[in-house]
Image: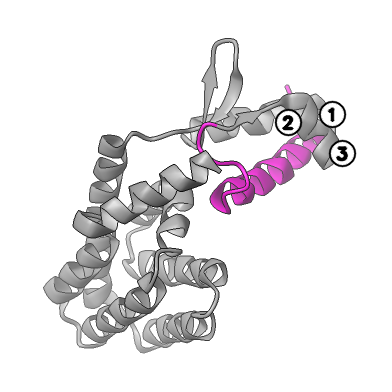
Amino acid sequence: MPNARTSNAAAAVRESLENAIACGEFVPGSRLDETTLANRYGVSRTPVREALQQLAAAGLIEMRPRRGAVVATASPERLYEMFEVMAELEAMCARLAARRISPEGLARLQAAQADCADHRADPDAYYDANERFHQAIYALSGNAFLAEEASALQKRLRPYRRLQLRVRNRVSTSYAEHESIVAALAAGEGERAAAEMRDHVRVQGERFSDLIASLAQLNAA
């Protein structure tokens, strides 16, 4: 059974690897070597192994025979399905938030949107602000279980949600969609908020084609 020191080291390695995967440093299909990672983070292989097991449980990596840990790869069909579910989870969060939002909660959401405005020139910085915006809506739903489920799938989709923001004009479009979502929540219009959020998160048509093309270019690089 791992001791507290090992568990803390594993948590630190897991968080760093999550960020590296989300930022595209480790692209889908990349092999994660335990010894290399141990040297990178200045720890033994035990916390690295524990961190990899946790990431595998979260669906961010896969443990493959003879290859070890590999960053999870989603087929186009699987990716579409995941975004479809994500859109419905977030739409539900928005619908509940519209009914339950307080003036203080609305102020926090508007502050998160203002933070997004400050980072529109940098897709990666905007992604971090965008994630905080969505997390705020999960919390405003007032349903802890729903917020946990939405957060878990958001984490699984991080590399892809970040990547789509690098498509031309997507950041400005995303910000405008946020404005519509905030307006619906402020007005207490649950169905409108749900519809706006669903359209904001769902990746289909040209957006899906752009995402797949960007992913193919990243893998080729």
Location of the C terminus (image quadrant):
top right
Q: Main secondary structure of the magenta part?
A: helix
Q: Label 1: few (<14), some or many (≥20) within 10 Å?
A: some
Residue 204 relative to residue 112: left or right: left
Q: Which mark is residue 42?
A: 3
Nearer the observer, 156 or 93: 156
Quadrant of the image occupied by residue 33:
top right
- The CA span between labels 1 and 2 is 7 Å
Disc 1, SS? loop
Disc 2, SS? helix
Residue 2 can be seen in this image:
no
Residue 169 can be seen in this image:
yes
Q: Label 2: few (<14), some or many (≥20) within 10 Å?
A: many
| Amino acid type assigned to the residue bearing label 3 in the image | Gly
Residue 40 relative to residue 95: left or right: right
Q: Vertical placement of 92 versus 21: above or below?
A: below
| Amino acid type assigned to the residue bearing label 1 in the image | Ser
Q: For the residues labelled 3 and 1, say whether their Cβ atoms are less than 8 Å apart.
A: no
Residue 125 is one of the magenta-drawn residues: no
